[in-house]
Image (cartoon, helix red, strand yellow):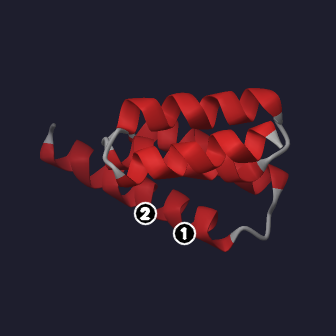
C-alpha cells in the first residue's frame, strides 16, 4: 500500500542521509495511514539524529500510544529524554 511504500522510500533516504526528504516521506506515510506506527518511529529517529529531541519524543510517544508493545520506541523515547536533559545541562 501507499503508506508502506512511502515509509520504505523514507527508509532508503534516511540511509542515504537525505534527512529532509526522509521526514517528508514518513510524514506523507502518516497522512495516508495515521494508525501505522512505523513511520512515526522512523520520523522520530530522524528528528532524534538531527537533535530535535522534542519532536522526536512526540513521535515516539505517538508510536507507544498506537502500539504500547513497541519496545524500540520506548527505548528511543527514554534515550531522547536523557539526551535532551544532557543538552540542557550543557547549555546548548
How many numbered discs sit on the rendered protein?
2
Quadrant where the image shows the N terminus? top right
* Left or right: where 28 falls relative to 84: right
For residue 75, which numbered disc appears in the image?
A: 1
At x 59%, y 39%, the residue is 58
Q: Which residue is mark 2?
A: 79
Q: Secondary structure at mark 1?
A: helix
Callout 2 crowding tier (Cα within 10 Å): few <14, some 14–19, many ≥20: some
Q: Secondary structure at mark 2?
A: helix
For residue 7, which numbered disc appears in the image?
A: none
**Res. 91 in view:** yes
Callout 1 crowding tier (Cα within 10 Å): few <14, some 14–19, many ≥20: few
Q: Is residue 25 above or below residue 39?
A: above
Residue 20, x across and y down, in percent: 39, 30
Q: Is residue 59 above or below residue 67?
A: above
Residue 60, x across and y down, in percent: 61, 50
* Left or right: where 90 falls relative to 1: left
Quadrant where the image shows the C terminus? top left
Distance Cα–Cα, label 2 vs label 1: 6 Å
Residue 75, x across and y down, in percent: 54, 69
At x 66%, y 73%, the residue is 71
At x 51%, y 62%, the residue is 76
Between 1 and 54, the one lying in front of the other is: 1
Asked if the residues shown at circle 2 and circle 1 are in contact, with their CB atoms under 8 angstroms apart, the answer is yes
Res 62 quadrant in image: top right
At x 31%, y 42%, the residue is 51
Residue 41, x across and y down, in percent: 61, 52
**Res. 40 in view:** no
Amino acid at each position: 500500500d501507499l503508506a508502506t511504500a512511502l515509509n520504505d522510500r523514507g527508509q532508503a533516504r534516511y540511509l542515504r542521509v537525505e534527512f529532509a526528504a526522509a521526514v517528508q516521506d514518513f510524514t506523507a506515510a502518516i497522512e495516508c495511514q495515521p494508525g501505522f506506527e512505523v513511520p512515526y518511529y522512523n520520523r522520530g529517529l530522524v528528528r532524534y539524529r538531527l537533535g530535535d529531541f522534542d519532536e522526536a519524543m512526540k513521535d515516539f510517544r505517538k508510536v507507544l500510544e498506537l502500539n504500547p508493545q513497541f519496545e524500540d520506541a520506548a527505548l528511543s523515547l527514554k534515550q531522547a529524554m536523557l539526551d535532551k536533559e544532557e543538552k540542557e545541562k550543557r547549555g546548548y
